[in-house]
Amino acid sequence: MSLVLRRIGHALPLLVAVSGLAFALIHAAPGGPLELYLSNPNVRPEDIARLRSALGLDRPLPEQYLRWLSGVARGEWGYSLMDGRPVLQRITERLPATLELVLAALGLSLAAAVPAAVVSARGRPRWLARVLQGAAVAGISLPVFWLGLALQLVFAVWLGWLPAAGRASLGDGGLGDRLQHLVLPAVVLAAVHAAAWIRYLRSSLADVLPLACVRAARARGLSPRRVLWGHALRTAWGPFVTVAMLDAALLLSGAVVTESVFAWPGLGTLFTDAIARRDYPVLMAFLMLAAAVVVVANLLADLVQARLDPRSR
């Protein structure tokens, strides 16, 4: 409990600092929410000034930030500059789609990374181990948007097996249809993380296999499979779980590119739309949500590490 309270005490000032930096960077970017009106010759300067005053953009930046921060402390995240709807409503509408994609990608990453890392660490069969190592390097090296476009071209355009974009077909929305739409974006989002996890877990297993506890298990006559899965993997599991939990938190922000490529109606597309229109309240809400998820994931990773490895306590 003391660890949890101490980390929460560290997290709150960190989130405030992140919010201040994000607020300053967003407002320092060229353009603004009124850029569309500025380029319209039919809009009078006094109308622009009236809109700027109504949105509070004519106030000094520190005052704008303090007003925003006090609103967040009261649970009021403001209103979207695109349609005037509450920011929390827009976030909660898009959150289920992003969680669906992230959880599917996380499951695929774990299902692919663990057996592939074990085969690579054993080195048998040799050809399969080399193929998996090469696939891991390729997964880390390939840009996410390029991989997404390539899979769309192959499986949606050429073969016609899967839909190219969206979360469901118009007028359908059944479970089978949703699963078909989920396959490609989930595979793309999982590919980079699975590739990194394969390399990390393989390296961790390579460090564990020479340990005395593993050699003792071999000396007791246990089969190589049982030694690997029951002893070596259990020892290497603690550091890997910590890294996997931290990477899982990054899936939320990493979904931005994937959702944009596949027109997935989640937080990623909401974020890109907000960037294009300089919707400051929505941008701040997304960035603070991503920062909070990373902070919580760090806390959970510390707790899991302390549970799996008593030495870290």
Image: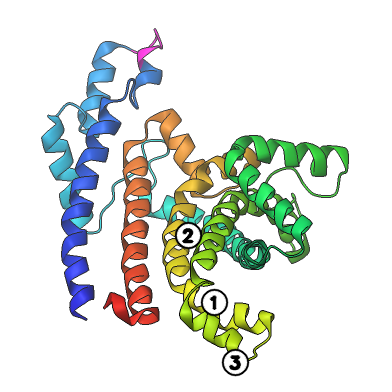
Q: Residues within 10 Å of mark 2 (few under 14, many from 20)?
A: many
Q: Mark 2 or mark 3, which is nearer the start of the sequence?
A: 3
Viewed as shown, does residue 165 lie left or right of 242?
A: right
Q: Which residue is mark 3?
A: 220
Q: Position of residue 53 (x, y in %)?
A: 20, 28
Q: Position of residue 18 (x, y in %)?
A: 24, 46
Q: Is residue 86 at least partly visible in the picture?
A: no
Q: Residues within 10 Å of mark 3 (few under 14, many from 20)?
A: few
Residue under the point 25% across and 54% down: 76
Residue under the point 22% across and 19% down: 49
Residue 152 sits in which quadrant? top right
Q: Nearer the viewer, residue 291 or 135?
A: 135
Q: Please tell me whether mark 3 or mark 2 is closer to you in this view.
A: 3
Q: CA distance from mark 2 to mark 1?
A: 24 Å
Cβ–Cβ under 8 Å for marks 1 and 3: no
Q: Quadrant of the C terminus?
A: bottom left
Q: Quadrant of the N terminus?
A: bottom left
Q: Which mark is residue 248?
A: 2
Q: Which residue is mark 1?
A: 232
Residue placed furthest toward the top:
41
Please tell me whether mark 2 sits on a helix, a strand or a loop: helix
Q: What's the amino acid at mark 2?
A: Ala
Q: What's the amino acid at mark 1?
A: Ala
Q: Which residues are magenta?
A: 38-43
Viewed as shown, does residue 104 lie left or right of 58?
A: right
**Most common SS among magenta residues:** loop
Q: How many marks?
A: 3
Q: Mark 1 or mark 2, which is nearer the start of the sequence?
A: 1
Q: CA distance from mark 1 to mark 3?
A: 15 Å
Answer whether residue 142 is magenta in the image: no
Residue under the point 18% across and 47% down: 17
